[in-house]
Amino acid sequence: MINFFHPISTSLSPNIEKDDIQIAFKLFFQPWNWKFNKNSKFAQNPSNLLEDEFKKYLGVKYAISFNAGRSGLIAILNALKIKNGDEVLLQAFTCNSAVNPILKIKAKPVFVDIDDRLNLSPECLKKKITNHSKAIMVQHTFGWPAQMDKILEITRENNLYLIEDCAHSLGAKYKNKFCGTFGDVAFFSFGRDKIISSVFGGMVVTNNDEIGERLLNFREKLNYPSNFWIFQQLLHPVLMRFFVLPSYNLNQYLGRIVLGIFHKFLILSKGVYKKEKKGEISDYFPKKFPNALAILALNQFKKLKRFNEHRKKIAQFYEDNLKKNSLFIILPFIWGGQEAEISPSFMRYPILINKNIDDILKIARKRKIYLDDGWRKSPVVPPDTNLKKMEYNLGDCPKAEKVVKSILNLPTHIHISQKEAQKIVQFLNQKTF
């Protein structure tokens, strides 16, 4: 039976559920509650409530919300006093949202190649550190924790700050400790296709008092986003559910047209703005986290455990059914109990295929299976990002450049049932590519 509202897709705002739609719809008619708390239902601002939930969940002293993960990163670089000419080391195969805040302050992004889990390689990291290096930013790609023991050792030996990019990894653990609690400071994202989603949103966490106070001071000076921007985000769950996703279910071209019209006429905002692909920061960032989106994020946070348990089951299903196919390379990791090396959050289930990915995606789209999430083709995504503006030189990170040509990210989100995962597996296991 076809789910009319949710085609099989890796992205396309996968976390939207009925209760999220209802909350967004109600808030749409309460513009007085969009920025500030004027709703007697809450004893304090929803953003403060969400911050308290993060503190309890991660066991941290500070949790400071922003209107996006990239806004949080801007605040972090400010709090660490990263300045013009300082080097921030980060992995290739990342999003331009992680690079642009570095460029904004005229610091230098230094790209490091990746390991077998698509995370920053400690061995390559050592070779890139110079006297100008000030911070390492480690990304837990698709929820797979990085090699934190080795990276922490390198960080301490060189007296560098460690920033954790946890945009993909809320709930992931390394040796029974949450990602986001290893470094000096970490940031999370609540973007439209992240672990939890409020369309836009982010959180910065730290246990360092000095950094925490600087972050609070930075946030205090920010404005809230405009009412128009908040209006776009509140419309997103409703229009995706009732117009965009059903259109994709009918026809891939119709889906693209409908979504394109909403973007063209600024009814919906894009996840990555055009100027961000050119090495610039949009005027929408950094801002405070508006009340309306904090309410959406709070509702999603209540579902975090269920979401991540579901992702793990679907990931296990993919592994069990794809590992015997010689066509695919499955990422190495250890499952299991408290003593397991890592416990991923599985925002995606990435596989590597020694075939033309464009051809595979084209065939899949004809079967109404949409697996292109934009995390491919380029060492800095989306694929149409200007690498020169990112200060990335082709050849700097050969392994990452090879991976982006062969990666396919499978969906694990709450709307992918085992039956739908089976359809994906059957498609991938066929011999017609």
Image (cartoon, rainbow, N blue to C red):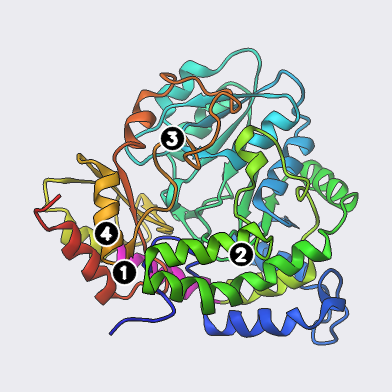
Q: Nearest to the eye among marks 4 and 3: give it.
A: 4
Looking at the image, tell me whether mark 1 or mark 3 is earlier in sequence order.
1
What residue does disc 3 label?
A: 378
Residue at the extreme top: 131
Mark 2 closeness class: few <14, some 14–19, many ≥20 residues within 10 Å: some
The residue at which mark 1 appears reads as 313
Q: Secondary structure at mark 2?
A: helix
The residue type indicated by label 2 comes to Phe
How far apart are the two marked residues, 4 and 2, measured between alpha carbons?
25 Å
Q: Nearer the viewer, mark 1 or mark 3?
A: 3
Q: Which label is found at residue 132? A: none
Q: Which residue is mark 4?
A: 364
Under mark 3, the amino acid is Ser
Question: Few, some or many C-alpha atoms within 10 Å of disc 4 (few <14, some 14-19, many ≥20)?
Answer: some
Mark closer to the observer (1, 2): 2
Residue closer to the observer: 152 or 279:
279
Q: Which-is-in-front pick, marks 3 and 2?
A: 2
Q: Which quarter of the figure is the N terminus placed in?
A: bottom left
Upstream in the sequence, badge 1 or badge 2?
2
- How much space separates mark 1 and mark 3, taking CA atoms? 30 Å
Q: Is residue 290 above or below residue 172?
A: below
Badge 3: few (under 14), some or many (20 or more) residues near its Cα, within 10 Å? Answer: many
Amino acid type, residue under disc 4 in the picture: Ala
- Magenta-drawn segment: 303-315
Residue type for callout 1: Lys
Q: Residue at image x 67%, y 59%?
A: 201
Name the residue: 75% across, 48% down.
Answer: 285
| Residue 314 sits inside the magenta stretch | yes
State the mark number for residue 262.
Answer: 2
